[in-house]
Image (cartoon, grey):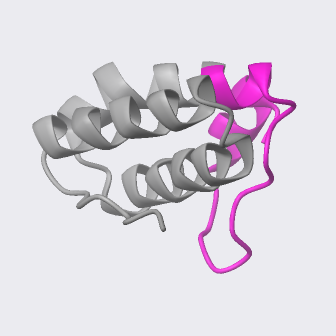
Amino acid sequence: MNIMPDFGTVHENEAAFDVAVAAIARGDIAWGRALLAALRDHIWRTEEHKSMQWILPKVLETLAALQTCPPSPTIPVREEWAVLYHA
């Protein structure tokens, strides 16, 4: 059973990213991808500055490498992000 880590500050978001990457590395790709998508949506929603600068690019790059997940339908995606990151 996988437990969803907390999101919030840049440090919590970085820890969540590390948990997702570790899950993917051990073969739990679906859960790792879901965690990355939730983290991405959280950062977009909260617009936490440091996470947008340091964590979001890594999240988007990793999702792209996993053939991207579309954003959650309840989270609005800024048009410029969708163009830049093909969300």
What is the tally of numbered marks visible in this picture?
Answer: 0
Residue at 78% in and 32% down: 83
Residue at 63% in and 55% down: 34
Check the image and report above or below for 82 versus 78.
Answer: above
Q: Which residues are magenta?
A: 62-87
Locate residue 72 relative to residue 2 in the image: left or right. right
Residue 76 counted in the magenta span: yes
Residue 53 counted in the magenta span: no
- The outermost residue toward the bottom is 74
Residue at 59% in and 44% down: 32
**Viewer-proximal residue, 68 or 83?**
68
Locate residue 57 relative to residue 52 in the image: left or right. right
Check the image and report above or below for 46 versus 82.
Answer: below
Residue at 31% in and 23% down: 53
Quadrant into which the C terminus falls:
top right
Query: Residue 60 location in percent, x, y?
Result: 61, 29
Query: Residue 67 location in percent, x, y?
Result: 87, 31
Query: Residue 54 location in percent, x, y?
Result: 30, 20
In terms of image quadrants, where is residue 6? Answer: bottom left
- The outermost residue toward the right is 67
Query: Residue 22 location in percent, x, y?
Result: 46, 29
In terms of image quadrants, where is residue 25? Answer: top right
**Viewer-proximal residue, 2 or 68?**
2
Locate residue 48 relative to residue 11 in the image: left or right. right
Locate residue 2 relative to residue 48 in the image: left or right. right
**Viewer-proximal residue, 61 or 31?**
31
